[in-house]
């Protein structure tokens, strides 16, 4: 194998290694615990969606359709 | 052929034609990057929601009239407590508050801080919180997105809510909620339940909905029927329904991108196939030369297969690595808006790294097999012809 190829292969291995390192060292318990504590306090798991506010739950133009621009109609019942 | 000589020749060939291979690697890595990013975001959100769903109450009961949720009478709480097998009945008061001037909205959540359990939960969430100081006067905890937004609009310490009665209610900002909870609490304002009632216009006998637990999962279906029979305008939703709707949604969104990926991949494969099967291409001449030098068809196929495999692995590793960094280190700017929206408050969250190895393997196979086939089939067709003919 020629040297530039070996260097390229080593680079790919380093990328994989750094990814596994980040994956292995991520504080999972802290992240999930905070979310669980938040849910325990509010008793809610609504996703914090950044969607436009719609004052009516109906689509004012086509009342038989769900209001447009709302994502929570699929995210929650 | 000697293995060392084979690899030496292969790597020399790869670097000699690096500009050609580089373009293929870049395009492949970009396609894989996009698909992996979408699947990473989707699986991370799903994982976080599944974890939080574990502590969510099992059932939610609300009043629905004409298909619209209306305030639920608090007296229903007593009716639920009386049912055998039901535990931990809790009332919830929440709703969106619209900041008309800028067309932004916040989610107000009322919590009964007089309950001991709420005290403990608050202490766990925000260490060293002085509960007495929090309950003294009108105070609230706000999500990071709300805090950033209010700061930018000069509401650094408090905010004046306009109640449905037309009066103003000044509420002080006590603390910001931890950023790890941004996925569910970015636009949240947590305040005492009576204050939330006043701002959202609920009477003292009304709540948004009521939650309860049924410790025995075998009783869930029976309990749904039993509770539904209490009132005609009562709606019961259990945790399994919520879980299903989340799964369906993310499978749907991930699936949509998978279809786009397949379309792009088939186009790319077609281009590769055409390039390798072009009559006067340099590839054809190269193969002819190798055959003329005494290489067997097997040797040529082995050589091209290994060369393609190196390209496939390199582009796959690069695509997945950049997707990983983009999603789990940089927080997926722009692409996260496909899943979380971007019209309201800015959400700067950290996605929990989740690698679904079965999905990663599927992506690799879906990508690698057509790629290798698109190269090897034309190569085989050239290598079985006479070297003299191939070099023409």
Image: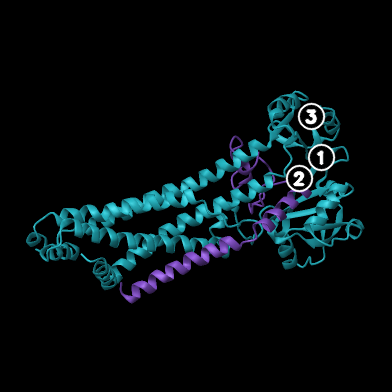
CB contact under 8 Å: marks 2 and 1: yes
Considering only vertical position in the picture, is A30 above or below B260?
below
Q: Give the label on residue A53, or none.
A: none
Relative side of B293 to B353, left or right: left
Q: Closer to the camera, B38 or A50?
A: B38
CB contact under 8 Å: marks 3 and 1: no
Q: Position of residue B169 (x, y in %)?
A: 86, 55
Residue B207 position by quadrant: top right
- The residue that label 1 is drawn on is B90
Viewer-side label of 2, 3: 3
Considering only vertical position in the picture, is B135 above or below B90?
below
- The residue that label 3 is drawn on is B85
Dot 2 and dot 3 within a common chain: no
Going from N to C along the chain, the mark reached first, 3 or 1, is 3
Check the residue under mark 2 and report the chain it is in: A
Viewer-side label of 3, 1: 3
What coloring was used for the rendering?
A: by chain
- The residue that label 2 is drawn on is A43
Q: In the orientation shown, which residue stands out farthest toward the front?
A: B2
């Amino acid at each position: 194998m020629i040297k530039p190829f070996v260097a390229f292969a080593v680079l790919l291995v380093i990328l994989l290694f750094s990814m596994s390192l980040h994956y292995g060292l991520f504080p999972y318990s802290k992240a999930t615990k905070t979310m669980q504590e938040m849910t325990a306090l509010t008793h809610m798991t609504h996703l914090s969606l950044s969607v436009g506010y719609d004052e009516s739950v109906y689509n004012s133009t086509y009342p038989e359709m769900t209001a447009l621009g709302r994502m929570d109609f699929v995210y929650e019942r | 052929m000697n293995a060392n000589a084979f690899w030496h020749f292969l790597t020399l060939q790869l670097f000699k034609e690096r500009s050609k291979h580089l373009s293929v690697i870049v395009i492949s890595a970009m396609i894989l990057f996009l698909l992996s990013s979408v699947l990473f975001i989707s699986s991370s959100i799903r994982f976080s929601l599944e974890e939080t769903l574990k502590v969510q109450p099992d059932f939610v009961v609300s009043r629905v009239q004409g298909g619209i949720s209306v305030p639920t009478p608090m007296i229903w709480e007593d009716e639920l407590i009386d049912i055998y097998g039901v535990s931990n009945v809790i009332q919830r008061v929440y709703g969106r508050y619209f900041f008309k001037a800028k067309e932004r909205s916040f989610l107000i959540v009322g919590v009964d801080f007089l309950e001991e359990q709420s005290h403990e939960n608050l202490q766990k969430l925000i260490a060293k919180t002085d509960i007495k100081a929090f309950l003294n006067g009108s105070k609230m905890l706000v999500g990071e997105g709300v805090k950033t937004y209010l700061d930018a609009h000069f509401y650094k310490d408090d905010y004046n809510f306009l109640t449905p009665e037309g009066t103003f209610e000044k509420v002080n900002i006590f603390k910001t909620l931890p950023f790890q909870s941004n996925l569910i609490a970015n636009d949240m304002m947590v305040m005492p339940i009576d204050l939330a009632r006043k701002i959202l216009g609920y009477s003292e006998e009304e709540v948004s909905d009521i939650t309860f637990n049924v410790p025995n999962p075998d009783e869930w279906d029976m309990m749904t029927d039993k509770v539904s029979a209490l009132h005609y305008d009562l709606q019961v939703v259990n945790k399994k329904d919520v879980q299903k709707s989340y799964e369906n949604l993310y499978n749907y969104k991930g699936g949509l991108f998978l279809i786009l990926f397949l379309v792009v991949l088939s186009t790319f494969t077609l281009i590769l196939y055409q390039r390798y099967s072009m009559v006067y291409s340099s590839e054809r001449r190269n193969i002819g030369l190798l055959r003329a030098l005494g290489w067997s068809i097997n040797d040529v196929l082995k050589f091209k297969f290994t060369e393609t495999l190196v390209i496939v692995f390199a582009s796959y590793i690069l695509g997945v690595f950049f997707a990983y960094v983009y999603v789990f280190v940089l927080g997926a700017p722009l692409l996260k808006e496909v899943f979380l929206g971007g019209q309201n408050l800015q959400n700067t969250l950290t996605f929990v790294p989740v690698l679904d190895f079965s999905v990663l393997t599927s992506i690799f196979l879906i990508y690698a097999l057509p790629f290798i086939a698109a190269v090897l089939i034309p190569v085989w067709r050239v290598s079985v012809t006479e070297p003299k003919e191939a070099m023409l």
